[in-house]
Amino acid sequence: MNIICTRWKTEEDFQGAKGLAGLDQGQVTCWTSWMRWSLISLFAAAVLAVPHAATRTVDGTEHGLQLAPASGRELLAVLRITALPAPRRDLEHVLHWSAWRRHHRHQATEAHRRWNNITAAATT
């Protein structure tokens, strides 16, 4: 009987995670993006579960604090404060990132130019 109750609680928690953290809203097309979306959603559910657990007493009754579901914007703000590191803003890093981005943009432009020349030659 105890195992059945535990499984039921797990199912309820999973349903809550799907609704509150957006686990069921991901539209993914490959394994990597599915894993990333699932990880972020479950991490968000864990971040939401901690304050919810803090509002309960030892005997399971609530302190009287009722919480509305967190919005996406609020959830992102909580994640940024609690888990995500602040972005680096030093000059060396900004210049390095800019050079990296411009280099890869140049490579993409050259690849498109080569591809367009190949397809243009094939059609003539």
Image (cartoon, rainbow, N blue to C red):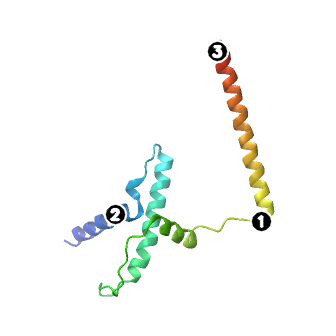
* Drawn side of residue 3 relative to residue 94, left or right: left
Q: Position of residue 65 (x, y in %)?
A: 36, 84
The residue type indicated by label 3 comes to Ala
* 61 is higher (above) or lower (below) than 41: below
Mark sitting earlier along the chain (2/3): 2
Q: Residue at x 47, y 43 (%)?
A: 30
Mark sitting earlier along the chain (2/1): 2
Q: Position of residue 117 (x, y in %)?
A: 70, 22
> What residue is shown with label 2?
14
Q: Residue at x 69, y 32 (%)?
A: 111
Contact (Cβ within 8 Å) of mark 2 with mark 3: no
> What residue is shown with label 3?
122
The residue type indicated by label 1 comes to Asp
* Drawn side of residue 34 relative to residue 19, left or right: right
Which numbered marker is on residue 90? Answer: 1
The residue type indicated by label 2 comes to Phe
- When asked about the image quadrant of residue 50, the answer is bottom left
Indicate the quadrant containing the N terminus: top left, top right, bottom left or bottom right: bottom left
Mark sitting earlier along the chain (1/3): 1
> Residue pushed farthest top?
124
> Residue pushed farthest left?
1
Secondary structure found at label 1? loop
Mark 2–mark 3 Cα distance, whole angstroms, equals: 54 Å
Mark 2–mark 1 Cα distance, whole angstroms, equals: 41 Å
